Image (cartoon, rainbow, N blue to C red):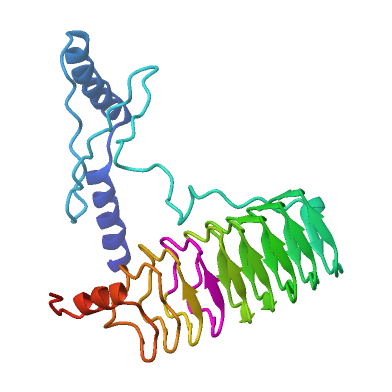
Amino acid sequence: MPGLRTHRAGRARAARVTVRPDRLAGAFVGAFAARAAPEQAGGTVAPLPAPRTGGPVPRPRAAPSPLAAGAERKVPATVSSRRSRPNAGTPRPSAPDPESVIADEDWYGREVTGRTYTRYSFVDTDWTEIRTENAVFDACVFSGVRFNASRHTGTAFTNCTFQRCTFFDTAFTDCKLVGSHFQRCEFTLLAVRGGDWSFTALPGARLARAGFDRVRLREADLTGADLTGAEVTGCDLSGSALSGCVLSGADLRGSDLSALDPRTAELAGARIDLGQAAVIAAGLGCRVE
């Protein structure tokens, strides 16, 4: 009968795949005994082969070697352990002391004699007709200060910075302004008599009709300055930067012009003496005999 034949075929298949439990346990015991024997003898146990699943067998990765106990990891000197930042080692400028800031004050007509100001900041202060004598202003900042009609005698403004200041009819007599910088300042009828203005920075300054008499201006920066009609007599300009300087109609007699390149400056109508003429001629490549 069809139903009887199907039932017998199923029993036959079950009989073929049936595994006795005692034989299965014996097989596992034998396998573990075979692996334990080399380990007890001090040998190396070979890993069991990975089962084949139809894909590629993964390659074993080498275990990283552990660091020795107490050893520190050394970083090469050429490799920084931190990400570098621009200007990371540049110190930030310290904030100015509020007590050293003088802002929006009226110093009109004051007399400052023998006083010393170090690292002070004068902001939008009116110095009109002020008088200073033998005073010292060191590393100070003058921003928006009006020096109109002021008079300064024997006063030192060393390493100072002048920003947006006005100098109308201002006079400096035997003053010391070594290392000072002038930025976007206005000069009208400026008069300087004697004193030391070495290393002073006046690039692009408009000094038309200004007066410099017997002033030491060694290595001063006058690049692109306009000295049209100015009086620059008996001044020491050795080592100064005079490129692009306008000296048309200026009186240069008695000044040291050894640093002047006549090919980069405007000298039309300038007044010079015979010694200066020889220097300028040599600068133009002429032979003076």
- The image position of residue 86, as x and y in percent, is 45, 57
* Residue, far bottom: 268
Q: Does the magenta run of residues contain 207?
A: yes
In-front residue for pair 77/191 = 191
User: In the image, residue 175 lies at what x, y percent?
Assistant: 62, 58
At 21% from the left and 20% from the top, the residue drawn is 35
Image x and y of residue 269, in percent: 39, 91
Residue 118's place in the image compared with 25, above or below, is below
Pick the front one: 100 or 254: 254
The residues colored magenta run: 200-222
Q: Residue at x 54, y 81 (%)?
A: 207
- Look at the picture and state if 72 lies above or below 160: above
On screen, 80 above or below 227?
A: above
User: Going by the image, does 91 lie left or right of 238?
Assistant: right
Residue 248 is drawn in which quadrant?
Answer: bottom left
Residue 131 inside the magenta-drawn segment: no
Q: Residue at x 25, y 57 (%)?
A: 9
Tell me if 105 is positioned left or right of 143 in this view: right
- Nearer to the camera, 225 or 176: 176
Decide whether the magenta segment is chiefly helix, strand or loop: loop
Q: Is residue 229 left or right of residue 12?
A: right
- Observer-nearest residue: 278 or 134? 278
